[in-house]
Amino acid sequence: AAGVIQSPRHLIKEKRETATLKCYPIPRHDTVYWYQQGPGQDPQFLISFYEKMQSDKGSIPDRFSAQQFSDYHSELNMSSLELGDSALYFCASSPPDSGGQETQYFGPGTRLLVL
Amino acid sequence: AQSVTQLGSHVSVSEGALVLLRCNYSSSVPPYLFWYVQYPNQGLQLLLKYTTGATLVKGINGFEAEFKKSETSFHLTKPSAHMSDAAEYFCAVSETQGGKLIFGQGTELSVKP
């Protein structure tokens, strides 16, 4: 079965650089979520999109922005990178409303290292 | 505000022994509850979930969890641990259908031969 695809899988950047993370949801899934998992931490919700509109926002820095495109893929743009942005970034997708049984399916993550 | 507390950041059991990973939540509304497993350098895989209906939920790999509203708990169990169960386990809660997940701190499960 198709899974959530994230690219790149690994990324190394310098401080103050920018990074773009991409997420391709499972086909026919219309909702995308972004989470950040710092070293030894639990995943923290950043932002979500439903049908290309932002649906919820969590602890996402102002330096970060995201969007969902017409083909439902999503991109997380990160500017002025800081050392503390080093983390594993997960994307998850969920299918259209099916009576409350929606599950978030996670991608393998993008590991970002800021030097 | 919703939150999740996992008791014990590290649990060690012997192969074949009972696995019990504890999770308590706080939520202002009936919650949706999940257990995810994370193997080293991999993403999160859903083990099981509780949305409505039967409070005893069976998941993959022989795991199950019971939703106890009176105790605000959703503990994960497996009768007999296998070496391949060694991983990080996260309990998560959501207050809305398809809403953001709030994760607990995670419990690292070690399985001794």
Image (tube, rainbow, N blue to C red):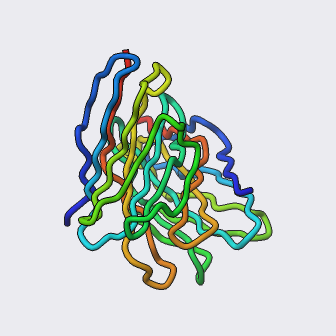
| Residue closer to the observer: B69 or B30 | B30
Residue at the image position 49 percent from the left and 40 percent from the top: B109
Asked if residue B73 shows in the view, the reply is yes
Query: Which residue appears farthest toward the left when viewing the image?
Result: A1
How many numbered discs?
A: 0
Placement of B16 over or under B97, stated as above or below: above
Residue at figure coordinates x 60%, y 41% from the top left: B105
Q: Position of residue A74 (x, y in %)?
A: 32, 54
| Relative to B87, B23 lies left or right | right
**Picture coordinates of residue A11, whole percent (x, y):** 27, 28
**Observer able to see residue B61:** no
Identify the image quadrant of residue A113: top left
Quarter of the N terminus of chain B within the rendering: bottom right
Q: Is residue B36 above or below residue B12?
A: below
Residue B94 in the image: state x and y as whole percent. Answer: 60, 63
| In the depicted structure, whether residue B28 falls above or below residue A17 | below
Looking at the image, the residue that sits furthest to the right is B70
Considering the image in quadrants, where does the C terminus of chain B appear? top left
Q: Position of residue B50 (x, y in %)?
A: 56, 71
Horizontally, residue B49 falls left or right of residue B55, namely left
| Nearer to us in this view, B26 or A7 | A7
Vertical position of residue A29 compared to residue B90: above or below: below
Quarter location, residue B112:
top left
Q: Residue at x 40, y 48 (%)?
A: A66
